[in-house]
Image (cartoon, rainbow, N blue to C red):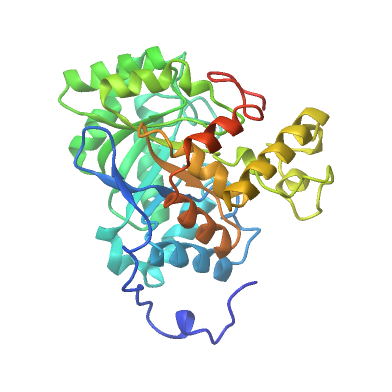
Amino acid sequence: MPIAADDPRLTHAYEAASTRYTDVPFQRAGASGIPLPKVSLGLWQNFGRDRSFDSQREIVLHAFDRGVVHIGLANNYGPPYGSAESTFGAVLDSGLARYRDELFVTTKAGYDMWPGPFGDGGSRKYLTRSLEQSLQRMNTDYVDVFYSHRPDPETPLEETVTALVDIVRSGKALYVGISNYPAELARQAYELLAGQGVKLLLHQPRYSLFDRTPEAELFPALRGLKVGSAVFSPLAQGLLTGKYIDGDVPADSRAANSHFLNGTALTDSYLERIRGIDRVAKEAGLSIPQLAVAWVLRDPVVTTAIIGASRTGQIDDAVAASQVELADDVIAALEEFAAAPGASVV
């Protein structure tokens, strides 16, 4: 529910909770000086113009009050494109800006953003101009990490990397990240960056009980390079919740409203898996989402798990999960229902 018009968070200056650093464990990103909360908030599908500003502001402020100080964005998050960054900028303006130095804000560019040949990919022009636009939308003069959102086969990797290096040297981003890069390209990007005196801080891959692809090659590469990872979709776009355990698609669910997920995913195999995971979760005293988040955090190569949230309770669930160390027998019991190591079932 949107917060009331007379709620103190709207009528009085925002004052962050004094307990904000007591709940979420922090872990360093690879061999760096940056510790991140083990859960982070991604402003992907719930921060467009189809949601009320009050409810979006409430989620961001609640996350910060719980110690979730890492906020992940991208230029085309919304919908429409750019609206998630604009919403976050408005939240900063409404009282959070005084805590900017306690926030770790990231954004990305690499996918379609504006028409024409310069609004997509990994070119110097696209990355540089996209970041300029992102900073304007967010009303901040820098981001903590700027990511190349994807490898671009049409652009030499050297061009992409040099653009990232120059962005860091300009002070408009403090660190560099890459997302969706396979292991070999990640190694190449790391070496090219290192050759220009810039360290690769984070890689952002998809990872969950249902998609263990990074375990085959990417995670071993990141461990060797001592690079952290900020994994996204730890709940497999909502499949790792109890919403669909009866085989139905609730009208207000992501499967009913998102082109990234639909009812065709609710196969007999999926239902068998999610019901098995539910049994393991109940035996461990956890909800399915809590178990799923705790599972991706079991490996130290995962610095943080990026969650989405449409209500504050989902943040609280993830914060609780970040404190859980799964027993070996729980991890073993999940193997029957998870994807095979290095593989995906979604």
Specify whether residue 317 is in view: yes
Residue 326: x, y in percent?
A: 47, 42
Point 83% across, 46% down: residue = 246
Tally of marks: 0
Residue drawn at x 59%, y 62% as measured from the top left = 311
Along the line of sight, the residue nearer the viewer: 294 or 155: 294
Quarter containing the N terminus: bottom right
Question: Where residue 162 sits: x, y (%)?
Answer: 26, 23
191 lies left or right of 186 = left
In the displayed structure image, the side of residue 242 where residue 305 appears, left or right = left
Which image quarter: residue 330? top right
Q: Assign the C terminus to one quadrant of the image.
A: top right
Query: Who is closer to the viewer here, 128 or 145?
Result: 145
Give the residue at the far left of this rendering.
197
Q: Is residue 79 visible?
A: no
Front one among 231 and 132: 231
Residue that appears at 43% across and 45% down? 325
The percent coordinates of residue 68 (x first, y second) are: 40, 57
**Residue 229 image position (x, y, % from top left):** 38, 33
Quick check: 289 above or below 196? below
In depth, the one of 200 and 50 nearer the eye is: 200
Is 64 left or right of 43, judged from the image as shown? left
Q: Residue at x 60, y 27 (%)?
A: 335
